[in-house]
Image (cartoon, rainbow, N blue to C red):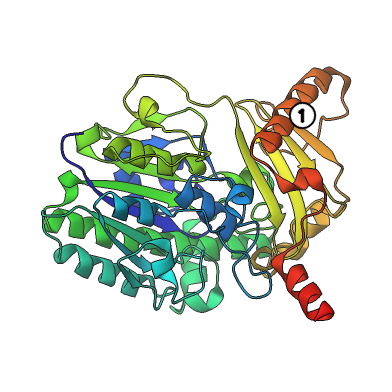
Amino acid sequence: MATRPNILLVTGHDFGRQLGCYGRGSAVSPRLDRLAAEGVRFDNAFATAPTCSPSRAALHTGRYPHSAGMMGFPYDAQGFRLTSNETHLAHLLRNAGYRTALVGFQHLVVPGREADLGFDEAWPDDVKDGAAVAATAVDFLRRQDAAQPFYLELGFFQAHTDWASYPETGWAGEERSRGVTIPGFLPATPAVESYLAAFQYGVRRLDEYVGTVLDALDQCGLAETTWVVVAADHGMPVTRAKGTLYDAGIEVTLLMRYPGLGLVGGRHVDALVSNVDVVPTILDAVGARVPDGVDGRSLLPLLTGDTAQVRTEVFAEQTFCDDYAPMRCVRTDTHKLVYNAEAGYSISYDQDARLNPGHHDIQMRYRYLRPHFELYDLTADPDEQRDTYRCDDARETAADLRRRLRAWMEDTGDPLLDGPVPSPFYHRGVRELLS
């Protein structure tokens, strides 16, 4: 690439693929839909984890959550941290000559430690105020010149369904009057509809805020020289989605636009890709060194049309959600195998999902003990309602996927192979007990 592009990496919170451009019913997202029509849309992109910090660790380091050390949240209650040898994309691009900046939400380090990730500048305040985050990003763009390329990481809190972050009156009725599409894996009850109306409102707000920043790229004359990447951190924040390895928990938006690389024209990429692939793709494209040990694969051959696929499967994991709930999965184009390492109920008890008004209704549908393994035929059963693991005609598929999953866990040094994984909370308690 003769001229290195500016890079704008936009992340949204919890919105999965709930956009009009992905055919998601009543979703209102004209600006992101337009970006997809102008650039490239990945139709089979998946997160490496169904919760925020682990998935974001993979997105920004190119390493699986257990490889990067982020198997839970960085809050004091769990206290996970990126391991000392992990390097954030901001640090890698700064070493390659980029000016690096963060505006808004990042969820990998405690507030005030953003410089540890490699940012020259950071404005992490008011992360729930999407309009303020967008305005700060616009101000940053207006101050740029052509002398040095920039990496701007823009993190929106939306479409997280925090009721306090939606202060406008009348939004619920407005969204319900538009119509609310209820996915097939959820019961069609008034409470579920009410919750999805809140979620749909969050997506609409996110779309508006991203649109403000995209307008600023045009106004500042930066659209042609900026590689825009938009990614969701994981799937939708509802019971049996967020905090689980079903598709609703790990399917994500991934959109890109950059004329200099031919990422234009509304192209669709059907190949399986993982958010762990974003870092090596960006580094490969801008001519920066990809660190040894990166787990992701460059998608550049897909983007340039040199190959039809770079993966035959994707992997995802959960170790800690609100509590210890270790799971691993392998997903191909047609099947998914989920390994549940500990006993427990089949649905997630992620706090965000548990607080939604429809949680009780969903819980009643799925309240059963999960088995060690689950197998789903995604072609015949896209909502993953029928576990075929014990079916005679699925034995070969199950055995093949078990082998693939085990090989991945071994190759990446998954600590779950050695037994239960304690959190930093456990280690701190032991140290205090023995002191």
Q: Position of residue 282 (x, y in %)?
A: 35, 41
The amino acid type, in three-letter code, at marker 1 is Arg
Please tell me whether residue 180 is drawn above or below residue 427 in the rendered image.
above
Q: Position of residue 386 (x, y in %)?
A: 79, 35
Please tell me whether residue 157 is drawn above or below residue 215 in the rendered image.
below
- Horizontally, is 422 left or right of 121 in the view? right
Q: Secondary structure at mark 1?
A: helix
Nearer the observer, 295 or 292: 292
- The total of numbered circles placed on residues is 1
Residue shown at the point (62%, 60%) measured from the top left: 193
The quarter of the rendered structure image containing the N terminus is top left
Residue shown at the point (33%, 63%) measured from the top left: 209
The quarter of the rendered structure image containing the C terminus is bottom right
- Horizontally, is 131 left or right of 315 in the view? left
Residue 256 appears in the picture as rendered:
yes
- Where is residue 352, by image quadrant? bottom right
- Horizontally, is 143 left or right of 286 in the view? left
Please tell me whether residue 173 is drawn above or below residue 193 in the rendered image.
below
Q: Position of residue 350 (x, y in %)?
A: 70, 63
- Where is residue 303, by image quadrant? top left
Residue density around tag 1, few if under 14, some if 14–19, many if 20 or more, within 10 Å: some
Residue farthest front in this picture: 435
Q: Which residue is mark 1?
A: 402
Residue shown at the point (73%, 74%) measured from the top left: 428
